[in-house]
Image: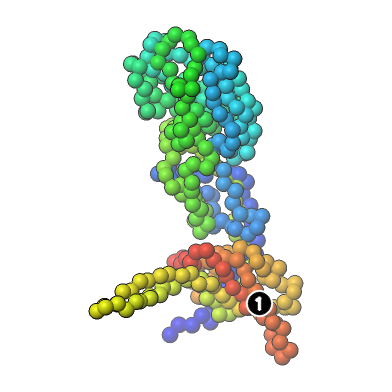
Amino acid sequence: MATAENAKLDYEGGQTSYAMATMTDSGDNLTFTSAVTLWSRRSGYAPIIRPNGLLTGGAVIPALAAGNNNVDVAALTCNLNGVVTSVSADTDVSITRPATAVSKINSITVTTGGTIAVVAGTDGSTTAFSEVRAAAGGPPLIATTSIEIAQVRVITNTAGVITTAQIFTVIGTHRETASYPQYTVDYSMGSLTFLAALPDDHTGPVAKSVYASYASPIFAEIALADAFTAPETTHSVTSTQIYNTTLGSSSSSLGQGSFVAYLEDGVTDTLVTLKNENLWFRFYPDRYNTANVLAQGKLGITRSWPAGDNIQVACTISSTEAATEVA
């Protein structure tokens, strides 16, 4: 039978930080990846994720000055190309009408420079609107570095006051916000996955840009370690006896990981200074092979200083996900 005599246990002893940058669409407009495969969650190094989109404000209304073909835009804040940006209110923003009495959609946008700009769509062939980007009578494609906050729809070439009914701000259709759709983060893959596919509303056509800053772990070996247990999912069954049969149900729970380490003084050891931090741990059953187990969780410690034995610390790994295997 094999033993773990040649095992090795690493911990996240440091981090390499990466500045805010665009993430890569995996091709489905759902999952976006970064330049690394592991994201740290240690305090001060956890990822900051900023999908392009409106954060606050940005209401678009008919021009209060009642001028023809104009709208007013309220002050707003947004995630703009990785930066939280404040944009001043703008008044009498001019809407372009079609050359004849046909449909035309204007997109109200925030440009890469943090200003309000109108992008006019192509004139339609009738007064009916299209919902297809860049189609005749449809909304225009937006620059990849811009954010759409509203659409204004007109069906005549005659100058006139823009009404509330002509302004469309449905989130996800006419308005891009930073919080929609929501996403989940996979720290073991350095990626995030949206709950719904981002629409191809930008020139390409492509989805809106997603930015993130993050850090990857730098692993260091715990020189004197033993008894590593990975955080694993366990299953249990409960049953209730009823007339003539038994009803059963199963449940799952995630257990803590653990290990023991032997210390120099139990006070200044690097591992001890990282207590209560959310760290990566990497365990090799055989240090001479590449197969390993990865776990990420908060490091808890219980130290002991026996008079006639080695100073040691019993460590726990409180994880939100089960450990993963790397072949």
* Residue 233 picture quarter: bottom left
Res 3 seen here: yes
Q: Nearer the viewer, residue 31 or 54?
A: 54
Q: Which residue is pictured at 57% across the width and 30% down the height?
A: 58
Q: In which quadrant is the C terminus drawn? A: bottom left
Q: In which quadrant is the N terminus drawn? A: bottom left
- Report whether 96 appears left or right of 217: left
- Report whether 80 appears left or right of 157: right
Q: Which residue is mark 1?
A: 302
**Please, what secondary structure does the residue beneath circle 1 have?**
strand
Q: Is residue 22 above or below residue 3?
A: above
Q: Which residue is pictured at 56% across the width and 14% down the height?
A: 66
Relative image position of residue 291 (x, y in whole percent): 47, 69
Please state the total of marks drawn on the protein image. Answer: 1
Q: Which residue is pictured at 48% across the width and 66% down the height?
A: 322
Q: Which residue is pictured at 42% across the width and 44% down the height?
A: 196
- Report whether 14 appears left or right of 210: right
Res 32 seen here: no
Q: Residue furthest front?
A: 243
Q: Is residue 254 above or below residue 162?
A: below
Three-letter code, disc 1: Thr
Relative image position of residue 206 (x, y in whole percent): 44, 35
Q: Residue furthest left?
A: 244
Relative image position of residue 74 (x, y in whole percent): 60, 27
Mark 1, other Cα within 10 Å: few <14 / some 14–19 / many ≥20: few
Q: Nearer the viewer, residue 76 or 10?
A: 76
